[in-house]
Image (cartoon, rainbow, N blue to C red):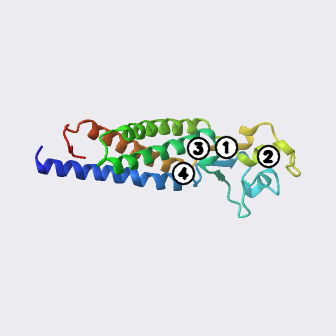
Amino acid sequence: MKQTERAAQSAGSRVLDFVVASAAPLILWFSFLNVYTYDPVGVPCSEIDGGGSYVLGICHDSGESGAGATAWHGFFSWSAMLLLLVAASAGVTAAVLRRHSRTGWPLFVGAGAAALGLIALAVTALDVPTYPPWLEFVRTGTLGTVTPSDDYAGTIDDGVGPGWYLILITGLLLAAAAALRLRQWSRRPAGPNPPD
């Protein structure tokens, strides 16, 4: 292999390693944003006078509606976060060990964990967890002057928030970089010192 091809391949590996390494802190940071959103259904917050939506914490004093929850409030969402963090960690491990080891197991683990993390993240869009304070208020039966409704869907509209989309974009970049890095590793020539 020519020296220029080897240098170009090494530079490409470094760029992919940088994408994988930078994904971990971004995913962790985005996981604390509003991954889930909850809005009152039916009556605008400005018309509610100390009713259930205020008690549930969905309406703010300024009349704005909406509440949120982080990625650490649902089983599939925290599973997705952990799998994506494992994928990024495996990619960093592969970058650190590439000069000292000829094995590609961290790359396989990283690509697999990224794929599983994206699948779990997709499931979170279909399985939004129940609004956390709702469960406590229904359990204790203390909604002030409002009695708890068994019709959760008729009271609270839930969905994914901006944090979910940021995690999805970062996870897709992570999965693509991990897959490309694995492809580079599998096509490297044999020899005592193969290029990155």
Residue, disc 2: 136
| Secondary structure type for disc 2 | helix
The circle on residue 78 is: 3
Ranked by sequence position, the earlier of labels 3 and 2 is 3
Residue at (68% x, 59% y) in the render:
64
Q: Which residue is mark 4?
A: 163
Q: Secondary structure at mark 1?
A: strand
Give SS at disc 3.
Answer: helix
Residue for badge 1: 157
The x, y position of residue 161, in whole percent, is: 57, 49
**63 or 87, which lies in front?**
87
Looking at the image, tell me whether mark 2 or mark 1 is earlier in sequence order: 2
Question: Considering depth in this image, is 187 or 63 the residue closer to the camera?
Answer: 187
Q: Are marks 1 and 4 in contact (CB under 8 Å)?
A: no
* Horizontal relation, residue 10 to residue 43: left or right: left
- Amino acid identity at mark 3: Trp
**Residue 145 spot, x, y in % from top left:** 89, 51
Dot 4 lies on which element?
helix
Upstream in sequence: badge 4 or badge 2: 2
CA separation in Å, label 1 and label 3: 21 Å
Identified at 49% across, 47% down, the residue is: 85
